[in-house]
Image (cartoon, helix red, strand yellow):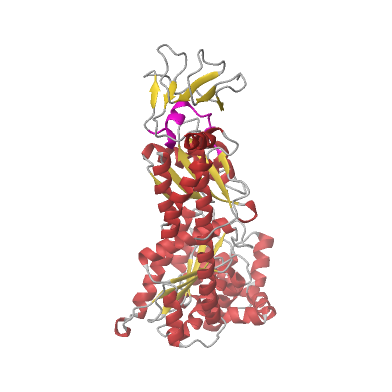
């Protein structure tokens, strides 16, 4: 089994660990079957230490080991006695009476586990052995919480660094409500580590252990619903549980990184245009759980803050949660796809049907568009405050040509970013003439800027100087296929006003929107404006006409 160096700091937070009680002594394996005399003795008395009979006088509650006649009277400071001889009637402290078959060495070893310098060592050893079983069997966090619950007799949960529950057992509705409230509160703190405020402020009845990963960064938290204070046995088991979870986390990280590397290598080869044989591509994808024998639709996505359009979301914790949710949606609605995250983009290949004769390009592409909407909706719930922009290619039936599909999706995503489509779905087919303009923008941006200046530049400057709406009117007029009445109705403006603005546009830029060639130039000018990152204004000045669109 894989081993690792123990974490630098497995912190136990929550209910404090109490001193052992007489009940804990009675529960020791070596004391199994022993009687406590008198019956009904208070077993909840906390004990501080253990010493043999004849030792120094104690000044605090101790357990006295007596291999011979009981001292009478009981020495000061003694709270209980372990002996083989039953006490006389009226003996002042409880006596645990061992059977003749019990070894004193076993008793002393078990007592050392309660009171020694390394308290809980033997309990921890037994817990480690029990937890090794689910680790060896590959049962993951689910197997670990099952064993831990059996060892401590209480509900257990394991949460990741975003406080998503990875596994839980024995957690009822009341536990869930308290836990969810603590998680929501921690997520609103704005802290670099969500685990820290959760550990500090979660309900006291939840014992919390922080599991550090590389660089002592908190990667997991183990929670157990235990009454305060904790026993030494409970603390020992929980610490072993945290260690086992650290091993499982490390194992899953290695597997995830390896699979991600393999997926990334395959997708990068396709995007780079490197020759990949059909058989090799299908075989490599199948090893990663994907089926690309019937081709695929390529999908690329960018996760970003809508208030910071210059950057994409790269926070490792948020990106990991987003990708997990994206995979869950894809597994449900479009299984056997290939999903990867390359640091700032989501890359997906959605497999086509295996049988060529049933491949309907339009149906497959429409299905991909529907799935894109589901992913965008799920993202709003998974990572609130961020938006997902998705671009999808045309369906490509030949696996060896999937590099071209990825290039289509990449181009559509780039165009979507330039024209302000954050949070929307952009398809390669819908980009239309934007594809041609974008190639000019990518190769010779100064030419596109010059074309914009010749067409829209004078209108933009006029609007800025006189607070008019010529550009907005032009965009709306073209949107409604040059329908004057529809444009006036949309802008709540009189048709005569729209006509006046169109005449003014012709005067300023020398292009008559009534002529086909000039109208195309103005349409391309608007698209150039978007690609250059300049927003087309939304109309704000509206005439209150009782009958808009009528003379």
Q: Is residue 213 left or right of residue 285?
A: right
Q: Give the vertical position of 375 relative to 444 (above or below).
A: above
The one of 332 and 17 positioned closer to us in this rendering: 17
| Residue 148 in the image, given as x and y percentages of width and height | 43, 45
Q: Residue at x 60, y 81 (%)?
A: 439
Tell me: residue 541, above or below residue 504.
above
129 lies above or below 445 = above
Image location of residue 206, percent across then percent down: 48, 37
Q: Residue at x 64, y 59 (%)?
A: 467
Can residue 44 be seen? yes
Residues shaded magenta:
13-32
Which residue ends up furthest to the left in the rendered image?
358
Quarter where residue 500 is shown: bottom right
In the rendered picture of this protein, how many numbered marks are placed on residues? Answer: 0
Compared with residue 507, is residue 128 higher up or lower down, i.e. above or below?
A: above
Is residue 523 located in the magenta-colored stretch of the structure? Answer: no
Q: Quadrant of the C terminus?
A: bottom left
Residue 327 horizontal/vertical position (percent): 44, 64
- The answer to whether residue 384 is visible is no
Q: Looking at the picture, tell me which residue is in the foreground, 254 or 402.
A: 254
**x, y (%) of residue 139?**
41, 57
Residue shown at the point (39%, 42%) measured from the top left: 171
């Amino acid at each position: 089994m894989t081993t690792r160096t123990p974490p630098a700091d497995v912190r136990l937070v929550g209910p404090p660990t109490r001193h052992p009680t007489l009940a804990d002594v009675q529960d020791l394996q070596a004391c199994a079957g022993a009687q406590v005399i008198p019956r009904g003795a208070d077993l909840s008395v906390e004990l501080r230490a253990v010493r043999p009979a004849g030792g120094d006088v104690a000044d605090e509650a101790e357990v006295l080991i007596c291999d011979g006649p009981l001292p009478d009277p009981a020495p000061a400071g003694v709270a209980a006695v372990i002996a083989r001889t039953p006490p006389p009637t009226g003996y002042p402290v409880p006596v645990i009476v061992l059977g003749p078959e019990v070894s004193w060495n076993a008793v002393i070893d078990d007592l050392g586990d309660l009171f020694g310098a390394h308290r809980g060592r033997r309990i921890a050893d037994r817990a480690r052995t029990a937890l090794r079983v689910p680790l060896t069997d590959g049962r993951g966090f689910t197997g670990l919480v099952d064993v831990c619950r059996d060892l401590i007799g209480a509900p257990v949960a394991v949460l990741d660094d975003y406080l998503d529950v990875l596994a839980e057992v024995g957690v009822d509705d009341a536990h869930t409500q308290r836990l969810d409230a603590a998680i929501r509160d921690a997520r609103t703190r704005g802290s670099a580590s969500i685990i820290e405020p959760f550990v500090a402020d979660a309900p006291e009845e939840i014992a919390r252990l922080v599991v550090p990963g590389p660089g002592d960064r908190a990667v997991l938290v183990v929670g157990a619903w235990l009454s305060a204070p904790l026993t030494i046995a409970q603390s020992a088991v929980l610490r072993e549980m945290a260690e086992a979870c650290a091993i499982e986390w490390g194992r899953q990280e290695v597997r995830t990184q390896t699979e991600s590397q393999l997926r990334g290598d395959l997708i990068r080869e396709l995007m780079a245009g490197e020759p990949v044989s059909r058989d090799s591509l299908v075989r490599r994808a199948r090893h990663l759980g994907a089926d690309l024998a019937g081709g695929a639709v390529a999908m690329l996505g960018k996760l970003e803050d809508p208030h910071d359009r210059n950057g994409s979301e790269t926070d490792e914790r948020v990106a990991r949660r987003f990708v997990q949710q994206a995979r869950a949606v894809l597994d449900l609605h479009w299984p056997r796809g290939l999903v990867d995250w390359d640091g700032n983009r989501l890359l997906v290949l959605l497999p086509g049907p295996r049988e060529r004769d049933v491949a309907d390009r339009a149906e497959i592409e429409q299905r991909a568009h529907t799935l894109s909407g589901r992913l965008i909706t799920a993202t709003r719930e998974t990572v609130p405050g961020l938006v997902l922009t998705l671009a999808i290619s045309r369906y490509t039936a030949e696996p060896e040509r999937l590099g071209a599909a990825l290039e289509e999706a990449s181009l559509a995503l780039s165009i979507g970013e330039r024209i302000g489509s954050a949070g929307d779905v952009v398809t390669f087919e819908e980009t239309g003439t934007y594809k041609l303009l974008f190639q000019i923008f990518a190769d010779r941006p100064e030419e596109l800027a010059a074309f914009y200046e010749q067409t829209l530049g004078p209108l933009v400057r006029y609007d800025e100087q006189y607070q008019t709406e010529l550009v907005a009117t032009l965009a709306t007029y073209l949107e409604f296929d040059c329908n004057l009445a529809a444009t006036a109705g949309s802008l709540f403006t009189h048709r005569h006003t729209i006509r006046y603005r169109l005449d003014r546009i012709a005067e300023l830029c020398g292009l008559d929107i009534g002529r086909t060639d000039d109208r195309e130039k103005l349409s391309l000018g608007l698209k150039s404006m978007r690609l250059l990152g300049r927003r087309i204004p939304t109309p704000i000045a509206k005439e209150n006409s009782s009958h808009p669109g009528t003379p």
